[in-house]
Structure formats: C-alpha cells, structure tokens
Image (cartoon, rainbow, N blue to C red):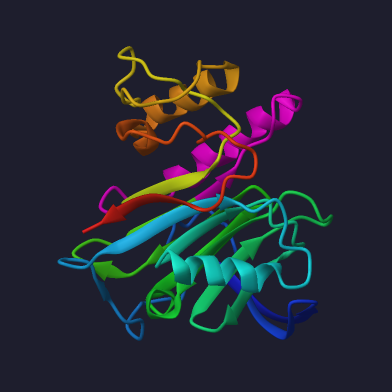
C-alpha cells in the first residue's frame, strides 16, 4: 500500500492535509504501517452509533457544517456519506470530526466516511477505491473494524452497475476474516421482505426490484445480512429527502 500526501484548498476550509492510499495486491494493511504508534479502540461495553446518509451534495458552502451538526444532534460516532460531489480523494478535520472522502474528476457521485476524532486517531489507513467506494480500517480490541461506504449506480447505468459490484467484491476480498466488516451506503435498491434469502429479514419495505435482486445476490455471496430489514421501519423510509438514519449500534 503506497501513500502520498497532498495539500489542497476547498470552499469548506482554508487548508486540507490529505493522505491518499492507493490499492495494490498486498492486502488491506498499508506497507510500512506497523500500527505500533496507533492507539487501539476498545469496543467492549462501549456504545458506538453508526449511520449512513445520502446527502445529495456537500459541494455548497455550509453543507459540511450542517452535516456535523446533525451528527452531534444524533450522537453519531461514524457516518457513511453518499453523493458528496467532492472531487479527488483526501481527508479533512473539522471540530470533533475527521472526514475521509473519495471522488472523481467531476463534481458527481463521491463517497466519504466521517468519524469522531477519538475513533479517527485509531485508524490504520483508508482506501479511496473510486468515486463510489471508500474503505477504512480501525485498530480495535478484540477485533479490528473495517468500514466500507458504497454508492451504487441507478438502473439507467447497467454497465456501470456491473463494474460497481465487481469493484465492491474486490474491496471486500481484501478484508481479513478476523476483522469485523461493516458495509453500508446507498444502493438504489429495494429488497422487500422475503423468507427466501438468509440475507433478508421480515421487515423490508416495498417490492423487490432488479437492483434489489442484485444486492441480495451479493449479500448472499459474502454471507451478509441486510440489517435494515431486521427491524421495523417508519412508513416514510423511502422518501427522497429522508434525513440521516442510524444504521445500527454496536455494544
């Protein structure tokens, strides 16, 4: 894993110290990163709230601050972000939070992960796969935690959807079996509720669509559970402008 540091400016801040990680075939752990100087986060008897939010855009003045206000209000520790519309990749620290992000060359798509600073300081590294997938690894005890945020294409981009799931599979394969993997994001899919799949609970909403079937197949392949279908959800769960939702809590 190779790193290079870049300084850049953005409307949201005067200066960003960015560290970009580039994938190679050596696995998840960055080369030269022994982890000796990285604090270890203890998760036992600790409540950690993890959420995901399709923000539509952060490419407007004040949007990032509004996001942090929502996180503080809901006491969210880790938040996955879809559709940031930020370009390139890097990190930014603001107030009590650190955000890592991954984007393309245009102000489209884009993903990010926002962590409280006490969690971000335990981060071994992060991997901006592309403008639709980003992953970070947190050194924790008893198990390291890998957070992956994904933003799937819509049904209008079938070729791009195939490439998305291929890249997602590649990313997941880099995670060690001893790590706790949390995959979240905006998948532009409805999986409904069914007893035909072990990955889906009884509390899914709507009817399964083609993208939902693709997501279900991917989850079955990796033996994932779609957590949102395990709990009763509000009837407006699919409203376009739905605010931040808590993905789940870890104790």
Q: Nearer the viewer, residue 116 or 142?
A: 116
In this rendering, position of residue 123 left or right of residue 95? left
Find the residue positioned furthest to the right. Answer: 106
Q: Nearer the viewer, residue 242 or 35?
A: 242
Check residue 177 for magenta coloring.
Answer: yes
State the image coordinates of residue 198 (x, y, percent, origin top left): 29, 22
Image quarter where the C terminus lies is bottom left
State the image coordinates of residue 16 (x, y, percent, origin top left): 69, 82
For residue 188, above or below residue 127: above
Check residue 213 for magenta coloring.
Answer: no
Find the residue positioned furthest to the top. Answer: 196
Choose top left, top right, bottom left or bottom right for residue 187: top right
How many labels were placed on the picture? 0
State the image coordinates of residue 78 (x, y, percent, origin top left): 43, 63
Rendered residue at 36%/15% (across/down):
194
**Range of the magenta residues?**
149-178
Rendered residue at 50%/20% (across/down):
206
Find the residue positioned furthest to the left. Answer: 45
């Amino acid at each position: 894993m190779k790193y290079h540091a870049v300084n850049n400016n953005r409307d949201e801040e005067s200066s960003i110290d960015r560290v970009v990680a580039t994938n190679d075939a050596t696995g998840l752990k960055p080369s030269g990163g022994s982890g000796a100087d990285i604090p270890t986060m203890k998760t036992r008897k600790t409540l950690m709230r993890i959420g995901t939010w399709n923000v539509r855009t952060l490419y407007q003045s004040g949007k990032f601050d509004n996001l942090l206000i929502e996180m503080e209000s809901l006491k969210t520790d880790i938040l996955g972000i879809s559709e940031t519309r930020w370009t390139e990749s890097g990190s930014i620290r603001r107030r009590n939070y650190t955000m890592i992000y991954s984007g393309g060359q245009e102000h489209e798509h884009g993903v990010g992960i926002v962590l409280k600073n006490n969690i971000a300081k335990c981060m071994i590294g992060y991997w901006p796969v592309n403008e639709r997938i980003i992953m970070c690894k947190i050194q924790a005890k008893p198990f390291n935690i890998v957070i992956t945020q994904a933003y799937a294409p819509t049904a209008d981009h079938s070729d791009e959807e195939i490439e998305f799931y291929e890249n997602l599979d590649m990313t997941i394969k880099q995670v060690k079996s001893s790590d706790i993997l949390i995959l979240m994001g905006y998948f532009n899919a409805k999986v409904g509720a069914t007893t035909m799949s072990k990955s889906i609970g009884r509390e899914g909403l709507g009817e399964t669509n083609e993208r939902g079937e693709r997501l279900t197949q991917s989850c079955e392949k990796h033996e994932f559970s779609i957590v949102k279908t395990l709990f009763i959800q509000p009837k407006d769960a699919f409203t376009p402008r739905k605010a931040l939702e808590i993905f789940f809590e870890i104790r």
